[in-house]
Amino acid sequence: MPRRRQPMMTLLLLVLVAFGANLAVLFRQGLVPPAVNPLPALDLATPDPWFLDWRLAALRHDPGLCRHVLTSPTIVAEALPDSPLKAGCGWNNAVRVSNVNGIRAGFDPATCEAAAALALWLSHDVAPLAEQMFGERLVSIQSFGSYACRNIVGNPLWKAIRSEHATANALDISAFTLAGGRRISVAKHWKGAGVEAQFLRAAHASACRYFRVVLGPDYNEAHHNHFHLDRGLLGQCK
């Protein structure tokens, strides 16, 4: 290659890399307009969807797509009026979740993408895991809530920053109940050595495929009794 062409090719490569990076950010933040988004809508009944994170993010600002994706019986979710952000608190494109594939799961409000992630996780990972490990059907999860107008707790480095709970984009789960009445508690069973602990650790690990941040008792004391799952900007599985 002639030397005079090398700077041009380098510049072209840098432009392509920058374009690709910016495009990836747009997809990750759900900012690609629906009319030009080439990714198909999620089908919550189908396991292992490809480009999962970006397709979940596409629900963030699109109520029409949300209504199309969040359908019974995979999930029972009712659209809620927006609560415009005030002092960093409020929600947009949120739903009231009551049931996922026959599993009682109450979250009110929860963002559409968090609700979709919950439906995929419970349907394709946690429920089959319960059947496999206990021979029983998962019938309910215990919620510690989804919306709370507050900052991040438990980490002094982040204490001045609003939690994802402040925009209903996070879900807290403390326990799982099986059809026979058996209750598997994060607070009680996480540190054990029995099948309950194995179930909780497997459920925690699998959530990292659907949620960007998954925190449990090994993260800090503030999470000793629940899983924190959110669809925020960052990524962490601890």
Image (spheres, rainbow, N blue to C red):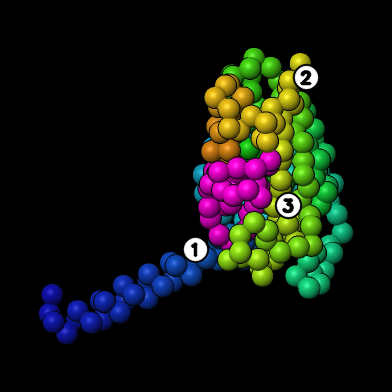
Residue 25: give x, y in percent of width and height: 52, 65
Image coords of residue 20 (percent x, y): 43, 67
- The boundaries of the magenta stretch are 209-238
Q: Residue at x 73, y 25 (%)?
A: 183
Camera-near label (2 vs 3) is: 2
- Name the amino acid type tagged 3: Cys
| 189 in magenta | no
- Image position of 12 with respect to 74: above or below: below
Q: Looking at the rendered structure, which numbered label has been put on residue 112?
A: 3
Label 1 sits on what residue type? Ala
Picture disc at residue 181: 2
Question: Mark 1–mark 3 contact, CB under 8 Å?
Answer: no
Position of residue 188 relative to residue 27, above or below, is above
How far is disc 1 from disc 3 in space, using C-alphas? 21 Å
Disc nearer the start of the sequence (1/2): 1
Helix, strand or loop under label 1:
helix
Marks 2 and 3, the one that precedes in the sequence: 3
Q: Residues within 10 Å of mark 3 (few under 14, many from 20)?
A: many
Is 220 inside the magenta-drawn segment? Answer: yes
Q: Residue most toward the bottom? A: 4
Q: Secondary structure at mark 2?
A: loop
- Please give the residue where the numbered disc 1 appears in the rendered image: 24
